[in-house]
Amino acid sequence: EVQLVESGGGLVQPGRSLRLSCAASGFTFDDYAMHWVRQAPGKGLEWVSGISWNSGSIGYADSVKGRFTISRDNAKNSLYLQMNSLRAEDTALYYCAKDRLWSGVGAFDIWGQGTMVTVSS
Amino acid sequence: DIQLTQSPSFLSASVGDRVTITCRASQGISSYLAWYQQKPGKAPKLLIYAASTLQSGVPSRFSGSGSGTEFTLTISSLQPEDFATYYCQQLNSYPPLTFGGGTKVEIK
C-alpha cells in the first residue's frame, strides 16, 4: 500500500525549533519529488517547500525561507522539514505529499494524514 | 508570484446538479494546473492534473478544462460524496506552487 506517515509535530514556544519527518512506503521513493504543504486551522492550503528526487532542486515559500530546511534520505525513504525560529503564524497541520514527477511540478498524488504544529507560549 | 483566484468561494447545490468552479491565474500558466478535493478532517485528494487529465480512480463525472489564465472544474452530476472543498494549484512557476483559496460545495 502506498503510504506517507508524518510525525514530529507538537506544541512549541515561539522562537524554538521542531523537526518533522515523513516516512514513505509502497513506492520507489527516490523516483519522485516530495513536498510539504500546510493548512492553518479553518484555512486553505499553503505550499511550504519542495525537493526533487536527488535533492538537486529545492524551493521554499517566502513565508518560511531562511527559517525552514527541507531534506530527504532516499536510503531511509524519508522526508524531513527542519523548522527554526517558529512563529505563531506557523501553527498548522503539516502534510507530506508525493509529486507525480521527479522534478517537482507534477501535482501531488499521494498525501499523508498530517502532523499538527502549534506555536504558542 | 502567480496568484490563483477561485470563484465562487462558496456554492450551494443539490444532488444531481451540474457544478462548475472557476480558477483564474494572475498570469499565463499554460496547462500546468491541478485540482484537489478535500473533505473535513481528511487530506486533499488529487482529481485532475495538467488542467484536464483525470487522475486514476477518479469518477468520470469530474472534468477539467482551460489553459492560459482561466480554468474550470466541472462535476456533471453532483453526488452526496462530492460535498467538499475544492482547490486549484498552479505548477507552472516554481517556487512557489500556489493554491487557490478554495471553493466549498455544500448541500442545498
Image (tube, coloured by chain):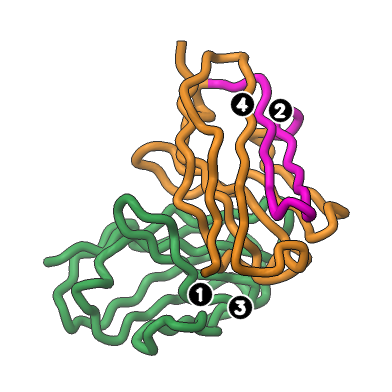
Chain colours: A orange, B green
The correct choice, above or below, for B56 with respect to A111 in the image is below
Callout 2 touching callout 1 (CB < 8 Å): no
Residue type of the residue flagged with mark 2: Arg
Query: Which residue is painted at 79% across and 54% down in the image?
Result: A75
Disc 3 is attached to a residue of which chain?
B
Callout 3 touching callout 2 (CB < 8 Å): no
Residue type of the residue flagged with mark 3: Ala
Highlighted magenta segment, given as a residue range: A65-87
x and y percentages locating residue A69 in the rendered image:
74, 36
Circle 3 SS class: loop
Circle 2 SS class: loop
Q: Nearer the viewer, mark 2 or mark 4?
A: 4
- The answer to which of marks 2 and 4 sits earlier in the sequence is 4
How crowded pointer 1 is (Cα within 10 Å; few <14, some 14-19, many 20+) is rated as many
Circle 4 SS class: strand
Callout 4 touching callout 3 (CB < 8 Å): no
Cα gap from disc 4 to disc 3, whole angstroms: 35 Å
Residue type of the residue flagged with mark 4: Leu
x and y percentages locating residue B31 in the rendered image:
64, 77
Query: Which residue is painted at 55% across and 14% down in the image?
Result: A14
Q: Nearer the viewer, mark 1 or mark 4?
A: 4
Q: Which mark is residue A57?
A: none
Cα gap from disc 3 to disc 1, whole angstroms: 11 Å
Q: Which residue does the numbered mark 2 point to in the structure image?
A: A67
Q: Which mark is residue A18?
A: 4
Q: Nearer the viewer, mark 4 or mark 3?
A: 4
